[in-house]
Image (spheres, rainbow, N blue to C red):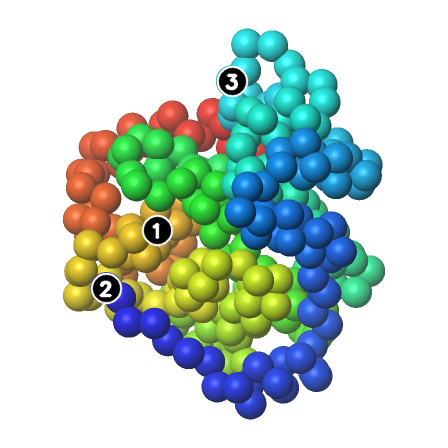
């Protein structure tokens, strides 16, 4: 299994003091408490979510979207919870709350565009997972896809010139974005994302993947682990989404594509089929 990497406690402490990190929302705390019970009550979970009007509206909009392909629309939260299941609705609630944790007026990047891109990656990851009949839940893939770059808005709030850093990384693909960030700021968005995910008490394997999602050596020693499978799916989802928007591969793809194909057990033709199918669903 892929070796887990830990982050120095001093680094984590410095992040807590020096960066604007969205606090774990009260709704998420309540849901985590309810889900930790031996037999979670779906009705109680639904009632708790229903108290948050904005989150409820987002869940209903999502579950009735073409992505789920329902024959008839769902109009209340309890039915949504029963249809999505506990993990599914928890994933959607978490994603909704994460987006609300950052304010545009404090950010040096366009957050609407950032979250649209993250959502496209998350949905693409779910689609890829279904196509390859993997053993990772759609909810986990969606959460990883949405959270994997959540350190970027944290960087953008802290540093006024952060958009210039992103632009530089596009034109210098031989270096990973975290490497460029480290050279400029002595911190990187992957570590910040790990901190956010950990403070929100996401599962440790998801936190680990957020920390290492730009590690181009992650698949060098294949071990058949779920972590490597999830990494491969996310890297492919990133590239498909990037290609859809920019008509070229993202910086990491040439360094990982061969091993991604090996892990997912697909070839270039199957990859192109996935691109053709998912492009119709991307915004």
Q: Which residue is mark 2?
A: 1
Q: Residues within 10 Å of mark 2 (few under 14, many from 20)?
A: few
Give the number of the mark in front: 3 or 2.
2
Residue 187 in view of the camera: yes
Residue 19 position by quadrant: bottom right
Numbered disc total:
3
In the image, what residue occupies the spot 17% across and 60% down? 222
Mark 1 touches mark 3? (CB < 8 Å):
no
**Residue situated furthest bottom in the rendering:** 10
As drawn, 87 above or below 203? above
Ranked by sequence position, the earlier of labels 2 and 1 is 2
Give the number of the mark in front: 2 or 1.
2
Q: In the displayed structure, does residue 18 sit left or right of residue 277?
A: right
Q: Residues within 10 Å of mark 1 (few under 14, many from 20)?
A: many
Q: Residues within 10 Å of mark 3 (few under 14, many from 20)?
A: few
Q: Position of residue 249 (x, y in %)?
A: 37, 50
Element type where label 2 sits in the image: loop
Q: In the displayed structure, does residue 46 sit left or right of residue 272?
A: right
Q: In the rendered image, which quarter contains the C terminus?
A: top right
Q: CA distance from mark 2 to mark 1?
A: 13 Å
Mark 2 touches mark 1? (CB < 8 Å):
no
Q: Which residue is mark 3?
A: 69
Q: CA distance from mark 3 to mark 2?
A: 36 Å
Q: In the rendered image, which quarter contains the N terminus?
A: bottom left
In the image, what residue occupies the spot 55% across and 21% down? 66
Q: Which residue is mark 1?
A: 230
Q: Position of residue 268 (x, y in %)?
A: 21, 38
Q: Position of residue 133 (x, y in %)?
A: 28, 33
Element type where label 3 sits in the image: loop
Element type where label 1 sits in the image: helix
Q: Position of residue 112 (x, y in %)?
A: 69, 47
In the image, what residue occupies the spot 68% across and 26% down? 78
């Amino acid at each position: 299994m892929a070796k887990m990497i830990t982050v120095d406690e001093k680094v984590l402490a410095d992040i807590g003091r020096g960066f604007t990190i969205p606090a774990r929302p009260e709704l998420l705390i309540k849901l985590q408490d309810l889900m930790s019970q031996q037999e979670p009550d779906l009705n109680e979970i639904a009632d708790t979510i229903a108290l948050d009007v904005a989150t409820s509206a987002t869940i209903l909009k999502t579950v009735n979207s073409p992505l789920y392909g329902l024959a008839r629309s769902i109009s209340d939260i309890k039915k949504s919870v029963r249809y999505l299941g506990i993990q599914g609705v928890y994933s959607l609630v978490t994603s909704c709350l994460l987006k609300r944790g950052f304010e545009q007026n404090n950010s040096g990047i366009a957050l609407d565009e950032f979250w649209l891109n993250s959502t496209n990656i998350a949905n693409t990851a779910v689609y890829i997972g279904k196509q390859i009949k993997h053993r990772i839940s759609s909810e986990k893939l969606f959460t990883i896809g949405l959270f994997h770059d959540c350190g970027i808005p944290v960087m953008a709030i802290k540093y006024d010139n952060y958009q210039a850093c992103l632009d530089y990384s596009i034109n210098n693909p031989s270096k990973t974005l975290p490497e460029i960030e480290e050279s400029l700021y002595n911190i990187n968005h992957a570590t910040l994302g790990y901190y956010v995910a950990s403070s929100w008490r996401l599962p440790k394997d998801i936190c680990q993947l957020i920390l290492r999602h730009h590690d181009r050596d992650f698949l060098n020693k294949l071990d058949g682990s779920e972590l490597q499978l999830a990494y491969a799916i996310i890297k492919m989802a990133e590239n498909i989404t990037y290609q859809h928007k920019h008509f070229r591969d993202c910086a990491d793809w040439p360094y990982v594509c061969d091993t991604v194909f090996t892990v997912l057990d697909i070839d270039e033709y199957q990859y192109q089929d996935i691109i053709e199918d998912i492009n119709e669903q991307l915004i």
